[in-house]
């Protein structure tokens, strides 16, 4: 059985990247969100947010709907079913890793010691 620290390397990097994790987590908390709201929430620049959204959309994790409201473009984002499953699974993995790391004990022959 691998140690919890080795399992960290097995996390889905598409989801685990901090900006994308923030976007997916925010979208998991609501039905949909508009681009400007996500930009304010995440603190990302327009270009950076657009780039991360494009990666998530290409992977099928988010759906992007572009419309106009009184001639003003409006971009709304929502999680797909795959996106919802991915973010739920990711947080379950992280919670499990955290629990296992907390219980982890170094080998007796190891020079590592556990702090208080």
Image: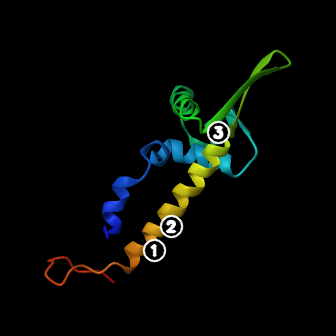
Q: Is residue 13 found left or right of 55 in the rendered image?
A: left
Q: Is residue 3 left or right of residue 57?
A: left
| Badge 1: residue crowd in 10 Å (few <14, some 14–19, many ≥20) | few
Is 107 placed above or below 69 here?
A: below
Give the quadrant of residue 102: bottom left
User: Mark 2 or mark 3: which is in front?
Assistant: 2
Q: Which residue is mark 3?
A: 38
Dot in front, 3 or 1: 1
Residue at the location (51% across, 31% down)?
A: 55
Residue 52 vertical position relative to residue 110 in the rendered view, above or below: above
Residues at badges 1 and 2 in contact (C-beta under 8 Å)? yes
Residue 98 pos. (x, y %): 44, 69
Q: Looking at this view, is 23 or 87 the one in front?
A: 87
Residue situated furthest front in the rendering:
1
The tag on residue 56 is none
Residue 73 appears in which quarter of the rendering? top right
Which of the marked residues, 3 or 1, is nearer the chain's N terminus?
A: 3
Residue 2 in the image, given as x and y percentages of width and height = 31, 67
- Residue pointed to by mark 2: 95
């Amino acid at each position: 059985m691998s140690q919890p620290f080795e399992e960290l390397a097995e996390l889905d990097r598409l989801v685990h990247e901090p900006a994308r994790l923030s976007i997916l987590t925010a979208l998991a908390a609501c039905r949909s969100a508009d681009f400007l709201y996500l930009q304010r929430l995440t603190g990302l620049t327009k270009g950076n947010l657009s780039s991360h959204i494009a990666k998530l959309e290409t992977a099928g994790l988010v759906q992007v709907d572009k419309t106009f409201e009184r001639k003003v473009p409006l971009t709304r984002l929502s999680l797909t079913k795959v996106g919802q499953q991915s973010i739920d699974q990711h947080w379950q993995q992280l919670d499990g890793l955290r629990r296992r790391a907390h219980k982890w004990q170094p080998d007796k022959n190891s020079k590592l010691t556990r702090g208080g």
